[in-house]
Amino acid sequence: LPEPGTVEFKDVTFGYPGAEAPVLSNISFTAKPGQTTAIIGSTGAGKTTLLNLIPRLYDATEGEILIGGVPLKELGREAISQNISAVPQRPYLFSGTIESNLRFGAQDAEEEELWEALRIAQADGFVSEREGQLESKISQGGTNVSGGQRQRLCIARALAAKPKTYLFDDSFSALDVSTDAKLRAALVEPTKDAAVIIVAQRVSTITDADQILVLDHGEIVARGTHEELLESSETYQEIVTS
Ligand code: DCP
Ligand code: MG
């Protein structure tokens, strides 16, 4: 059996209910623990849709997705939520405290572990400056923190859960280039045994990924490392220079 956390797509096709054309066609890849798999492609290419199939927000129309060698449909909701942390493209905070938001998926974490997650996510600075710190109130939807702060709190929440698989949907785009770089450097150690799948807009976020999948109109049109794709893929070259 593949290692726990491994994500395998086997010839996956998906169309939204009621839609005529599929949004994803014949997607096959393996995201291994200890590796970063990046997905890049223009807006509407199907990147978010692909990620959303992993925690079963939708089910594949054809083909199969396996986690650690077990088909998603046999895994059960609980195992899925315990093993996979997803940071969505529009990260969501619910009304409560910073702590209650971080503990979603990490109920038993020590307070020190929450701070460690905040440090990695480059969020410890602004949390420690807020009155009440971890007990500081978050309004419904997280409207009383900035977009970049919300993104980092959601990354900290994902880290606190210590999953085997991480899904980051464009999670670094609201950050300035320097914070983005610091955060990704800090992520290396805590995610080193996990399968990490990153959707990115900025090529600089993924140049060191173990494999990059280039998605175009719902199909993987090229795959490889940054250097390989610069040589082989016109679509990738266009993304790099755009
Ligand atoms: N789509 C749909 N119904 C939804 C969500 C998306 O019909 N509930 C369609 C819109 C796009 C296609 O699916 O034509 C792919 O959408 P994605 O959100 O997966 O695309 P990306 O994530 O790649 O785009 P972006 O870079 O803008 O986030
Ligand atoms: Mg998207």
Image (cartoon, helix red, strand yellow):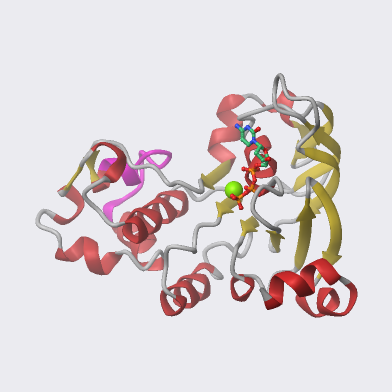
Does 21 sit above or below residue 116?
above
Q: Is residue 109 magenta?
A: yes
Q: Residue at x 70, y 45 (%)?
A: 46
- Side of 40 relative to 114 (left or right): right
Do we see residue 194 in this rendering?
Answer: no
Q: Residue at x 85, y 40 (%)?
A: 25
Does 224 sit above or below residue 92?
below
- Side of 99 relative to 180 (left or right): left
Tell me where residue 83 appears, x and y as whole percent.
58, 41
Q: Which residues are magenta?
A: 100-111
Number of marks: 0
- Side of 3 relative to 108 (left or right): right
Tell me where residue 182 appears, x and y as whole percent.
45, 77
Tell me where residue 42 appears, x and y as whole percent.
68, 57
Q: Nearer the viewer, residue 201 or 93?
A: 201
Q: Residue at x 60, y 33 (%)?
A: 80
Tell me where residue 78 appears, x and y as whole percent.
56, 27
Quarter holding the N terminus? top right
